[in-house]
Amino acid sequence: MCGYNSGPRPSPDEVCLSEQVIWVLNELRSEPYLKVFTSGSFLDGNEIPMRSAMELLKGVNSQSPGTKVLIESRPEFITDRSLMMVKNAHDDVEIAIGLETSSDKVRGSLIQKGFSWKDYVRAGNLVIENGFELKTYLLLKPPFLGEYQAYHDVMNSISDVSRTFPGSRISVNPINIQSGTSLEGLYHQGLYRPPWLRTVVKVLAEAKGMVPQGTHLMSCPTAGGRKRGAHNCGECDGAFLSLIERFSLDNTSPLVLPPIECCREDWLHEMGTSMIFPLKDG
């Protein structure tokens, strides 16, 4: 039984997702925050049938109305119509957009996202105007950017996003190397190293002092401390990850680079030798 009482017979995909929805809602009843990761766009009807997507939100609203739901979408699927459907299903929703960088050149040439800063701003404004919370994902260290270049790019992006949408949430996502990707090829050739955790802490600490009040900064490094994720030398990774986690929860925990010297000079050397930009806006 998939919860369809009337109307056209659901497709097999809808039936499958509906059964998953029932299981999830039973398992996660009364959770305060539910993230729906689609590795794409929750509001893309070709990826998830809209009927099933709205069923999930309605299920949360009926079984756990106090639960906030996070969904993700590319800008082109964020419209007045799609947001009205979301609002009718569940109004306590946070909508995340994977902007990655505020630089159209970096996003277009190095990440190839297929949309512009202008597209993001349009979608972000719609999210805010419709009463939802906005979350923006920024990518730390796209391929072909060195450590300092990546630091500089994400700091500019945090400034641009927080100035455009003050009081929103910004998540700094250090890149991690997935199997079967072109980035993995660069990694195996010694042409790419994931970002340092020292750089993540530096970004969060400096950005906290420049963003408008109420803007929430966070980072949750996937594969943090591993060779394919953001890491230091191995000896101090745990200390840096704990610092990032504590700060990301409420932005009140002190965030300063720990006085751990084991790999500080190596990090500073890499920062200092990567200050020439392959791409510049303007």
Image: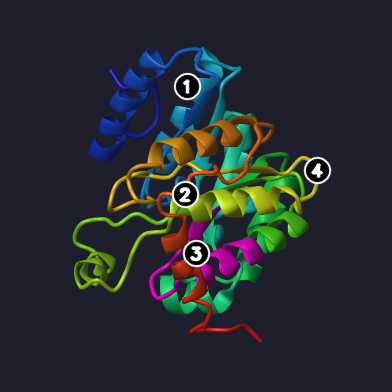
Q: Position of residue 129 (x, y in %)?
A: 75, 47
**Is disc 1 in contact with disc 3, using a CB cutoff of under 8 Å?**
no
Q: Which circle's residue, 2 or 4, is located before the other in the chain?
A: 4
| Gap in angstroms between the C-alphas marked 1 and 3 | 50 Å
Q: Residues within 10 Å of mark 2 (few under 14, many from 20)?
A: few
Q: Is residue 2 above or below residue 178?
A: above
Label 3, on which residue? 268
Q: Which circle's residue, 4 or 3, is located before the other in the chain?
A: 4
Q: Residue at x 65, y 70 (%)?
A: 118
Q: Amino acid at mark 3?
A: Leu
**Is disc 2 in contact with disc 4, using a CB cutoff of under 8 Å?**
no
Q: Position of residue 208 (x, y in %)?
A: 70, 47
- Labels 4, 3: front one: 3
Q: Amino acid at mark 4?
A: Gln
Q: Is residue 267 above or below residue 115?
A: above
Label 4, on which residue? 213
- Labels 1, 3: front one: 3
Q: Residues within 10 Å of mark 4 (few under 14, many from 20)?
A: few
Asked whether residue 112 is in view, the answer is: no
Asked whether residue 212 is in view, the answer is: yes
Q: Which circle's residue, 1 or 4, is located before the other in the chain?
A: 1
Q: Mark 2 falls on what kind of element?
A: loop
Q: Amino acid at mark 2?
A: Glu
Label 1, on which residue? 59
Q: Mark 4 falls on what kind of element?
A: loop
- Labels 3, 2: front one: 2
| Gap in angstroms between the C-alphas marked 1 and 2 | 51 Å
> From which residue to which does the magenta span run?
137-157
Q: Which circle's residue, 1 or 2, is located before the other in the chain?
A: 1
| Gap in angstroms between the C-alphas marked 2 and 4 | 33 Å
**Is disc 4 in contact with disc 3, using a CB cutoff of under 8 Å?**
no
| Gap in angstroms between the C-alphas marked 1 and 4 | 34 Å
